[in-house]
Amino acid sequence: MTPMIKADQVCKNFGSLQVLKGIDLEVGSGEVLCLVGPSGSGKSTFLRCINHLEKVNAGRLYVDGELVGYRQKGDKLYEISPKQAARQRRDIGMVFQHFNLFPHRTALENVIEAPILVKGESRAEATKRGRTLLEKVGLSAKVDAYPAQLSGGQQQRVAIARALAMEPKLMLFDEPTSALDPELVGEVLSVMRDLAEAGMTMVVVTHEMGFAREVADAVAFMDNGVVVEAGQPDQVLGAPTHQRTRDFLSKIL
């Protein structure tokens, strides 16, 4: 089977700073990969490369068998147009650390805007599914609330519903709970757990090791722009083989 994500020697530089130094990873359809590691290790940059928010400098990234951000002709790669990149990105949902909701739109309006503007759905169709998605994330009573009237956890659940409204085949989560008060973390992780059980392919940058151990099919520990260690959660988190992984986990577990 074609993996949902295949990274082949992916490198990313910002000027002279090499942030990703040859990432090799695969994520199968329906699998959950958790990326863990210290701040500055390249986790979020790799996530942003998957949907071409960042351009890779070397290597290749594929989503569902399609080369991301480029087309290949012979041995050469040519960057695709912004319109083509937007089409690829449409199939990849992303939830950021900060919720990025439109403050002047209600929860429902935040959820339905992209399907109407990007996919051309009718307002009636988008509204019907938007209400269903908000119910799915436990916010059926908040459809008319504005972001300022919602807690951080509720705003993040709206952000998840907004990403799901585009019916993506892949969901990316960039530390989705790190900006939340501790008592609100559980409600967001519960929604993500339900998504995983429903078979959504997910890549999650997280510091929530309990979630990674329970939900992930695979965990990759990154440090200094490389994947130091990857495997099943019990192996990477419970019996890591690399000293650098052990040092990191000893500080947070």
Image (cartoon, rainbow, N blue to C red):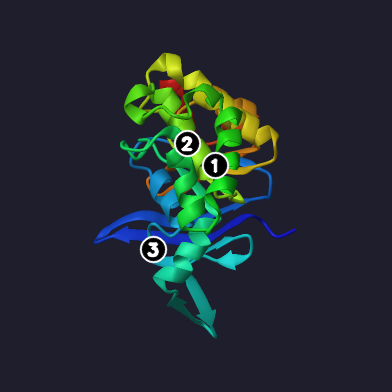
Q: Is residue 137 above or below residue 183?
A: below
Q: Give the residue pinned by disc 3.
A: 55
- The image's mark for residue 108 is 2
Does the CB distance between marks 2 and 1 fall below 8 Å? yes
Q: Nearer the viewer, residue 58 or 97?
A: 97
Q: Secondary structure at mark 2?
A: helix
User: Does residue 213 appear to the left or right of 58 in the view shown?
Assistant: right
Q: Residue visible at 69% across and 40% down?
A: 199
Q: Give the residue pinned by disc 1.
A: 127
Residue 227 at x, y percent in the picture: 49, 47
- In what quadrant of the picture does the N terminus appear? bottom right
Question: In 3D space, how far apart are the residues under numbered discs 2 and 3 (Cα atoms)?
Answer: 32 Å
Residue 161 at x, y percent in the picture: 52, 37
Crowd rating for badge 1 (residues with CA inside 10 Å; few <14, some 14–19, many 20+): many
* N-term mark: 3 or 1: 3
Indicate the amino acid at tag 3: Lys
Q: Secondary structure at mark 3?
A: loop
User: Does residue 1 appear to the left or right of 203 in the view shown?
Assistant: right
* N-term mark: 2 or 1: 2
Judged by depth in the image, the label closer to the viewer, 2 or 3, is: 2
